[in-house]
Image (cartoon, helix red, strand yellow):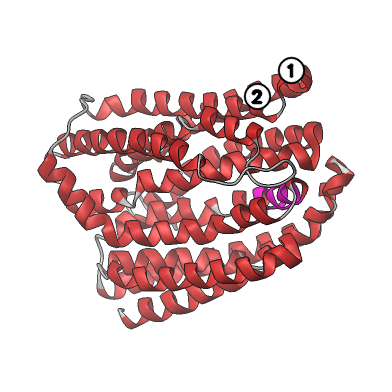
Amino acid sequence: MMLPFLPPGSSRLLVAKNTVSQLVGRVVSSASILVATILIARTFGPQGYGELTKITSYVALFYLLADFGINAMYLQLKKEDGDETWNTLLGLRLVGSILLMFMAIAILSFLPRGSSQGYTDGVRFGIIVFAPAILFQAIITTTNALFQEKLRYDLSMVAVVCGSLVTLGLVWLVTVSTAPLVGPVAAVIAFLVGSGVTALLALVLVKQFGTIRVKFDAVVAKQFLLASIPLGLTLLFNQIYFRIDSIILTLTRSTIEVGVYGFAYKFFDVALVLPTFFMNSVYPLLLTVSGDKFRHMLWRSCIFLLVTSIVLVILMWMGSPLITRIRPDFAGSVGALRILSLSLPLFFVSSLTMWTIIAQKRQMILIPIYGVSMIVNIILNSVFIPSHGYIAAAWITVLSEAIVLLATGVIAVTGL
């Protein structure tokens, strides 16, 4: 029976269907990753979890370079022969991600070593092992472009759920059997294998939309890259200011502090996928409407995101003391998570304002906004983290996102 407020063929039904598909996938995958995180934290403690955080945070910086916002431009610029255009996108991403893998390993040699802080030999080895995740993530991101175009996020959900369950199973094996022998690097391998499974299944599911042929059309690739520069730089700046706190903590504070903050951030990070997935469903529809319908869709989206984020703030604030039941060593994560949770409404609504500006084809204005935010964030973290640690990092996250929301909100509203 169809609900009266979700009539057949309506944009509301499409958004609801794809958002629910993403949420189901994310609930299962997030639950799997959270359980895996808890197992790792309980087994290795703040020191071991800190090493894992250093490895994954470093490699994650290169994920976004492989993405570079091309998916959004693919939806705007794709030709009538969408399958061939997608094959070119796949070829571009494969070449780019392989280059980024080698770049990540090369840059690593210039970073400072250390025993209790910085990039230790164990962390460096873990980064080299985890580097292929850049390639796997590029494939996953590329398949998501086609799933988004076809509004078939249910297929993406299948791949993500399977990969997450594989990761959880392998982490469980690591924590109950091999942990004393190989340490956190074994957990890194578990995450890598899970990512590979997700990428492989996503490619298999994409085949129902047409034949997969890795193609490199220089003209189309150039069109993608040039059109993606504004959004790509925006996302790059955003990623840097999103991750720079962990990097500065790595360089200036102990590995234990990195682990305490990283553990709190993992719970916070899980909540941030909700606005991303919601906007993945809304953005293609924003491109098809204008005028009052455009504004109405934005208003309803804003209300949903704001209410949802406030509920999550309350739940995180009240539930954060439960972290100490996992392992008392993570008591410091409670305060960090509570501070970070205060920024959830800012992150949720700024996701809407950013994609609104992109839908308005005014993405060039995002470059200075996120560029300034990144610079402010780097300066504040560089000044306050060495002396005040992860608590300063948490408060700076709140302040930085407030600046982004204020700027993007004003720009988005003036364009209506």
In magenta, the rendered stretch is 257-266
State the CA–CA distance, disc 1 to disc 2: 8 Å
Q: Dot 2: what SS?
A: helix
For the C terminus, the quadrant is bottom left
Q: Position of residue 121 (x, y in %)?
A: 64, 33
* Residue at x 47% of width, y 56% of height: 239
Q: Is residue 237 left or right of residue 117?
A: left
* Residue at x 38% of width, y 57% of height: 282
Name above or below for residue 38 compared with residue 68: above
Q: Position of residue 268 (x, y in %)?
A: 65, 54
Q: Does residue 204 show up magenta in the picture?
A: no
Is residue 188 in sight in this rendering?
yes
The reply to whether dot 1 and dot 2 touch (C-beta < 8 Å) is yes
Q: Is residue 109 left or right of residue 83?
A: right
The kind of residue tagged 1 is: Thr
The kind of residue tagged 2 is: Ala
* Residue at x 42% of width, y 31% of height: 136
Name above or below for residue 390 compared with residue 269: below
Q: Position of residue 88 (x, y in %)?
A: 19, 36
Q: Dot 1: what SS?
A: helix
Q: Is residue 150 left or right of residue 102?
A: left
Number of the label disc, if any, that sits on residue 186: 2
Q: Does residue 262 show up magenta in the picture?
A: yes
In the depicted view, which residue is nearer to us: 185 or 200?
185
Number of the label disc, if any, that sits on residue 178: 1
Question: Exactly how many numbered labels are in the figure?
Answer: 2
Q: Position of residue 252 (x, y in %)?
A: 68, 56
